[in-house]
Image (cartoon, rainbow, N blue to C red):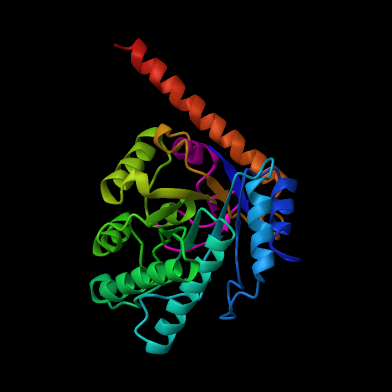
């Protein structure tokens, strides 16, 4: 499993590769524009090409993911906000594709209590239109759009894997759609994967709902809030309510061994550090070892 980190692009896109290297990451995730402003990306074609070329030939960074702007709300009942969200998603997809990203991770938004059924059509339309328009703008296929599971606060869309599956189904199973599984959001939404059996059940549920083939990346985070708290609060690995052992139970599952895991932890306040990436690798190793022991014990008992 490749281990990555969300890093800043301050000073230019290519600096993300330098920051990823500095913390020992195999993968980086970036914002291609301000995460909390509607300002359109301002990267020149030369800057986009420079990142794409540098990433393609990089010795240690194996993949790039982009995270869509937090303001996007494809479930909004406000026509102006919905229109802005659709435009912003398109811009994110075009820019991410231009730098050679493997996918754009998206928080779908909130229906504010109206219910998923009432907004499913507009969410589907926005996604399909953005993917189609991005391909038209690029003159080539766009990168995948990865729908992220939510922690479950308020009327957030994607508070369960079944909700993400409903969007994929509404889009006719579009192969350009995938999912991003956030470990903190999963915990906060009430999914207990603190044992091998619990982790197996969580992975089985993912496979039954959206399908493991759609899992494009994992956001690897501990949680400041307890199981089922329905709040999005990330913590450094092993320092939160999930804990290293529970994360190991999930991360060591063989069905996800080829899925990149990206850290979005606070670190010292500026995001993932080298020690956080090292902690992730230890947790992964512990998880793989725990499953190997469990298989050995099972074989010995037969």
Magenta span: predominant SS is loop
Name above or below for residue 109 compared with residue 271: below
Q: Which residue is located at x 26 percent, y 46 percent?
A: 208
Q: Which residue is located at x 46 percent, y 82 percent?
A: 84
Horizontal and vertical percent position of residue 94 = 51, 68
The residue lying toward the viewer, choosing from 274 and 192, is 274
Reply yes or no: does residue 103 show up in magenta: no
Give the image quarter of residue 296. top left
The residue lying toward the viewer, choosing from 35 and 92, is 92
Horizontal and vertical percent position of residue 107 = 45, 66
Q: Would residue 248 be visible to someone looking at this image?
A: yes
Name above or below for residue 127 compared with residue 227: below
Horizontal and vertical percent position of residue 203 = 35, 42
Q: Please give the count of numbered marks on the rendered protein.
A: 0
Q: Which residue is located at x 67 percent, y 41 percent?
A: 60
Name above or below for residue 237 compared with residue 75: above
Asked if residue 295 lies left or right of residue 66, the reply is: left
Q: Would residue 108 be visible to someone looking at this image?
A: no
User: The C terminus lies in which quarter of the figure?
Assistant: top left
Q: Which residue is located at x 37 percent, y 80 percent?
A: 76
Furthest-front residue in view?
Answer: 139
Horizontal and vertical percent position of residue 79 = 37, 88
The residue lying toward the viewer, choosing from 26 and 153, is 26
State the extent of the magenta-drawn residues as a range.
Answer: 222-251
Reply yes or no: does residue 231 show up in magenta: yes
């Amino acid at each position: 499993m490749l281990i990555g980190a969300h890093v800043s692009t301050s000073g230019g896109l290519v600096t993300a590769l330098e920051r990823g290297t500095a913390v020992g990451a195999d993968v980086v995730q970036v914002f291609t524009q301000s995460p909390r402003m509607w300002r359109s990306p301002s990267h020149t074609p030369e800057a986009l090409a420079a990142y794409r070329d540098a990433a393609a030939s990089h010795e240690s960074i194996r993949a790039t993911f982009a995270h869509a702007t937090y303001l996007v709300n494809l479930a909004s009942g406000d026509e102006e906000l919905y229109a802005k969200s659709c435009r912003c998603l398109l811009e994110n997809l075009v820019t991410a594709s231009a730098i050679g990203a493997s996918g754009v991770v998206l928080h779908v938004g909130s229906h504010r209590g109206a219910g998923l059924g009432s907004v499913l059509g507009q969410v589907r339309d926005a996604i399909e239109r953005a993917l189609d328009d991005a391909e038209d703008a690029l003159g080539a296929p766009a990168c995948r759009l990865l729908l992220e599971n939510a922690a479950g606060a308020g009327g957030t869309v994607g508070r369960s894997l079944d909700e993400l599956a409903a969007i994929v189904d509404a889009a006719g199973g579009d192969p350009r759609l995938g999912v991003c599984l956030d470990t903190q959001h999963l915990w906060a939404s009430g999914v207990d994967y603190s044992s091998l059996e619990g982790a197996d059940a969580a992975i089985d549920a993912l496979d039954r709902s959206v399908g493991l083939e759609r899992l494009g990346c994992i956001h690897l985070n501990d949680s400041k809030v307890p199981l089922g708290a329905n709040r999005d609060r990330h913590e450094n690995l092993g320092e939160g309510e999930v804990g290293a052992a529970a994360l190991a139970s999930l991360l060591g599952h063989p069905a996800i061994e080829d899925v990149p895991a990206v850290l979005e932890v606070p670190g010292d306040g500026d995001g993932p550090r080298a020690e956080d990436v090292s902690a992730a690798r230890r947790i992964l190793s512990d998880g793989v070892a725990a499953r190997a022991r469990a298989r050995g014990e099972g074989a010995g008992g037969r």
